Amino acid sequence: MDLASKLTAHFEDNIAATQRSMQTLCAPMLSAIDLCFGTVTNNAKILACGNGGSAADAQHFIAELVGRFERDRLPLAGVALNTDTSILTAVGNDYGFDQIFSRQIMALGQPGDILVAISTSGNSTNVQLAIQAAHERDMQVIALTGRGGGTIGDMLMPDDIHLCVPHDRTMRIQEVHILLLHMLCDGIDALLLGDSA
């Protein structure tokens, strides 16, 4: 395959992954937007976490909430749990990498808060423990996964929301995840500020 054909194949695979996601994820996305809106308008906060590219997505999402998305508005309460290197290295050193998110949730999470947990495989142990800690704090979870949802898909509660991208390739899952997070931001803003074309 020449390079131009390879690039075309990437575009086509991305389009197909997005279309499959559109068919399966619109309903849970509406629920996720309502949950986030209810959270930030009830003086609660959104915590988010992930590893690697998913950490970058969590940080990006929270930046859009605290800063702004496409329109000016008041800042919304959110914390990316993968950004404080002192906490990550202290907890990782003293308790193990698996607990870097769960200990922060135990410290910061309150009933009414939500956790946005991102794992392309659905099998990240530290994200699983974060979900467990969130449940123990009476927090709902929005899980963004792929590959069928992995272990995370099995541990979600009935009130949680599972946004599982119907694809097995990490890059495609991550590409759809950032689309879903942008849609969450846009949906929250539409409910806060009124719909905008």
Image (cartoon, grey):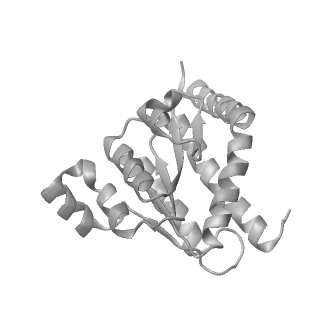
Expressed as whole percent of the image width and height from the top left, the position of residue 48 reads 46, 58
Residue plotted at (65% across, 81% down): 74
Residue 188, located in which quarter of the rendered image? bottom right
Q: Nearer the viewer, residue 48 or 103?
A: 103
Q: Nearer the viewer, residue 109 or 16?
A: 109
Residue 91: tell me if it is visible: yes
Q: How many marks?
A: 0
Q: Residue furthest top?
A: 1
Residue 50: tell me if it is visible: no
Expressed as whole percent of the image width and height from the top left, the position of residue 46 reads 52, 64
Side (left or right) of 15 relative to 111? right
Which quarter of the figure is the C terminus placed in? bottom right
Q: Residue furthest left?
A: 94
Q: Nearer the viewer, residue 5 or 64?
A: 64
Residue plotted at (69% across, 47% down): 29
In the image, residue 107 sits, relative to residue 145, either above or below, namely: below
Residue plotted at (65% across, 52% down): 32
Expressed as whole percent of the image width and height from the top left, the position of residue 83 reads 36, 65
Residue 104, located in which quarter of the rendered image? bottom left
In the image, residue 174 sits, relative to residue 103, either above or below, namely: above
Q: Residue furthest bottom?
A: 74
Side (left or right) of 196 relative to 182? right
In the image, residue 56 sits, relative to residue 9, either above or below, namely: below
Expressed as whole percent of the image width and height from the top left, the position of residue 196 reads 84, 66
Residue plotted at (26% across, 48% down): 98
In the image, residue 160 sits, relative to residue 11, either above or below, namely: below
